[in-house]
Image (cartoon, rainbow, N blue to C red):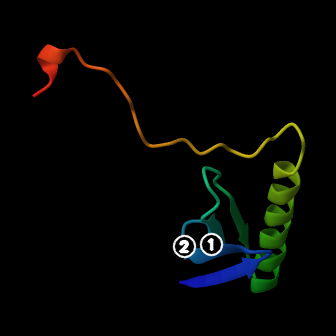
Amino acid sequence: MKTMTYRGHTAKIIYSDEDECFVGHVINIGDDIISFHGDTDAELRVAFEDVVDLHIKVKNQPENPPQKHFAERFLSRLRQALHL
């Protein structure tokens, strides 16, 4: 499996027999799903750079604040009778 890197983002590249082209998926991008495709290495590189640039542009707009991470805790009070 081939990878590409651009502006700190990495994509995994595979060849799709079904689509008959190269397909890339940007990894470690949070909750977003970013895919792109191209028939040649050059087309794939251009498509990858375009989607990363667009992703960065959209994320930096004021109406799109950064995603907040939540604590993985749930606090609850139990009645004394329920404590072991």
Q: Residue 20 carries which label?
A: 1
Task: Answer whether labels 1 and 2 touch (C-beta < 8 Å).
Answer: yes
Which is more toward the observer, 80 or 53? 80
Residue appearing at x 78%, y 77% in the figure: 6
Q: In which quarter of the image is residue 64?
A: top right
Above or below residue 50? Residue 8 is below
Residue appearing at x 17%, y 16% in the figure: 80
Q: Characterize the local packing of mark 2: few (<14), some (14-19) or many (20 or more) Cα atoms within 10 angstroms.
A: few
Which is more toward the observer, 5 or 22? 5
Is residue 21 in view from this perspective?
no
Is residue 13 in view from this perspective?
yes
| Residue type beneath disc 2 | Asp
Above or below residue 46? Residue 77 is above
Q: In which quarter of the image is residue 25?
A: bottom right
Judged left or right of residue 34, residue 51 is right
Above or below residue 76? Residue 63 is below
Q: Is mark 1 on a helix, strand or loop?
A: loop
Instruction: Provide the residue designation for mark 2.
Output: 17
